[in-house]
Image (cartoon, rainbow, N blue to C red):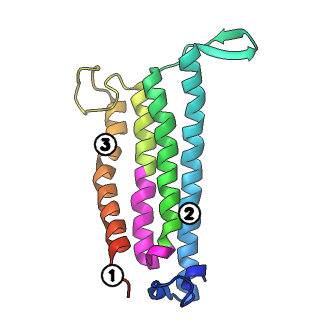
Amino acid sequence: MHAFSRPGSVPGLARLQVSSEESSMINEIQRRMIGHAALILFIGMLAGFGLLVSLIGGIELIPGTIMPISIVGGTDAWVRAHTGGILNALLILGVALALPPLGFRAQAAARIKWMLVGTGWANTLFYWAALLAPNRALSFASNRFGPSSLLSVIGLGPALLFVFISLFAAVLLARRAFAPRS
């Protein structure tokens, strides 16, 4: 059972009494969310290498000597892929840890999980597609940045869908956080 499952362990949160089976299911949901967060974090951190190469124009293997490397995407796109990946991972991680104190049951926690894990992966795909798409994957059609491509659709489609899904998840989290204590 979670530490918060014991009556009286957290004042005002007695509603969190759950069976050991329910607690085990929530633990598994949290583990999966943390695993996905770790993978998205890893990809975001890898983008940091692309950011470094885009900033200095190569890799410094020997101090004072930069080996020139050409890399796709502008520095601003690498910044977004790097920071966006890290922030999406932190979002998933934070919500995973917040599920028990907010009193989510396993079924509701599973819905929140797919909403936010899906958001993390959709955004990760978007950031990386934006590095390669001539129009930065900001629209399905051509825009002022360049012509549309298959990468535009691959990057924008899932990200756009999960914008609305993640907004709904945020409402569910806020409602639970501000719900009267029972």
Q: Which residue in the protein does label 2 denote? A: 32
Say whether residue 49 is visible: yes
Among the 4 quarters of the image, the one containing residue 76 = top left
Badge 2 amino acid: Arg
Picture coordinates of residue 108, whole percent (x, y): 40, 74
Badge 3 amino acid: Gly
Q: In the rendered view of the protein, which quadrant contains the N terminus?
A: bottom right
Q: Which residues are magenta?
A: 100-119
- Is label 3 in a helix, a strand or a loop? helix
Is 113 one of the magenta-colored residues?
Answer: yes
- Is label 2 in a helix, a strand or a loop? helix
In terms of depth relative to the viewer, which is nearer, 128 or 91? Answer: 91
Picture coordinates of residue 160, whole percent (x, y): 29, 45
Examine the rendered structure and indicate whether residue 32 appears above or below residue 53. Answer: below
CA–CA distance between discs 2 and 3? 24 Å
In terms of depth relative to the viewer, which is nearer, 64 or 136? Answer: 64
Picture coordinates of residue 6, whole percent (x, y): 57, 88
- Please report the residue visible at 45 percent of the width from the left and 64 percent of the height from the top: 113
Q: Which residue in the protein does label 1 denote? A: 180
CA–CA distance between discs 3 and 1? 37 Å
Q: Which residue in the protein does label 3 denote? A: 157
CA–CA distance between discs 2 and 1? 29 Å
Is 46 one of the magenta-colored residues?
Answer: no
- Is label 1 in a helix, a strand or a loop? loop
Picture coordinates of residue 131, whole percent (x, y): 43, 27
